[in-house]
Image: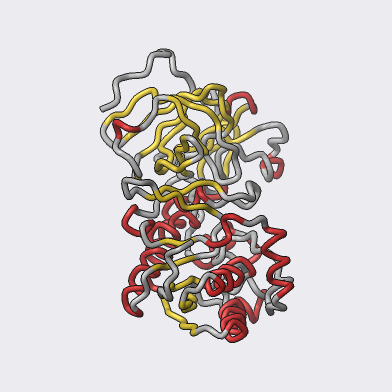
Amino acid sequence: MNTNEKKRVLIAMSGGVDSSVAAHLLKEQGFEVIGVTFQLYDYSRVNREAGKGGCCSLEDVHDARRVALQLGIKHYLFDTRERFQKRVIDYFTKAYQAGKTPNPCVACNTFIKFDELEFYANEVGADYFATGHYVKVIREEGGRVLLSPAKDAQKDQSYFLYGVSQEKLQRCLFPVGDYSKDEIRQIAESLNLAVSQKPDSMEVCFIPNNDYRSFLKNEAGISEEPGKFVSESGKTLGDHPGIHHFTIGQKKGLSQWGFHHHYVIRIEPETRTVVLGEDRSLLSEGVSFEITQLHCEPSEIPEKLFVKIRSRASQVEARIHEISGSTMTLEFTEPQRAVTPGQFAVLYHENKVLGGGPILKPVASLRSHEPSQCA
């Protein structure tokens, strides 16, 4: 990269190995690097009672400071707990209350992390801001910036960043996108970084032990609102303690109510109904979602493209069935399982992220195989 004539970059340091090595790589490229850690959630009581949780805990803040000291760069801590509560935790809670399955990492990147990075980059006079996400940036001749999956397909995080605006992408750097995870760990070990052997966080950062049901009850204060289990034909099968206990495609845990071969097919929040059925009933021919971010004009969206309907899913081929206002309906080439409201549909074409948005509903059957005119 030749944009490094001692230009200043502000990098988000989570206290993990990826962002730590990212800071080193930027320094090696000649940037003046400043580290920043955002305190998103107060872990003090939880740490005493249950041990360290996911990323962004108080221990992680300490690790980030240690690495910054090793690298010889400035490091700041900013308290963003109030905004994180409103834009991520409250969103997470309300989604489950509405019978949806949220993705808090998408919300955090879209509404918190990059907003905060942009603000504080301006405060310290930084030209760029960076993170340790596994993703690549493609800067096109016309000035548009698009994201592309990382070299390490198993670690790719382009799905989580679809909502970052063009304005912010213009100033974003993602140094680890061209490396595999093993290569990043090798660099950390060669530098003897304090976090070189630190395991990856696999949990939602504000939920200790990944027990979201206990969090919703004990921390978010969601009270149990019992409802009914029903079959696909409408027959009442039993009672359940609340729709926030369930997600589309779920089978695990249903046996405690006597359902050993059932899956959650649909959740109807208005009546607090959980519809159970067979696995085959989870297949959908299409998906309808709200377009909340596009990195191109609607007319530039190709009829045939690829889409990811959850973070750990593969890209699947699809074509546009209809665009109506801010809602897009895609038809899959092959039916997909457990399309889940609240998750996100992210569009890819030629290995570039075009945009996406929250899933509104699965479309079980698309009788017309001729796509409507895009509008």
- Which corner quadrant of the image does residue 89 belong to? bottom left
Judging depth in this view, the residue of 181 and 339 nearest the camera is 181
Judging depth in this view, the residue of 133 and 311 nearest the camera is 133
Judging depth in this view, the residue of 101 and 39 nearest the camera is 39
Residue at (39%, 36%) from the top-left corner?
289
- Can you see residue 284? yes
Residue 121: image location, x then y, percent: 36, 73
Q: Is residue 374 left or right of residue 313?
A: left
Q: Relative to 145, is 186 above or below? A: below
Residue at (57%, 64%) from the top-left corner?
207
Residue 185: image location, x then y, percent: 71, 65
Judging depth in this view, the residue of 231 and 301 nearest the camera is 301
- Can you see residue 44? no
Residue at (57%, 22%) from the top-left corner?
334
Counting labels gives 0
Q: Relative to 1, is 277 above or below? A: above
Q: Specify the quadrant that holds the C terminus.
A: top left
Q: Relative to 329, is 178 above or below? A: below
Q: Is residue 220 left or right of residue 152?
A: left
Residue 186: image location, x then y, percent: 73, 66
Residue 116: image location, x then y, percent: 38, 69
Colour scheme employed for the rendering of this structure: secondary structure
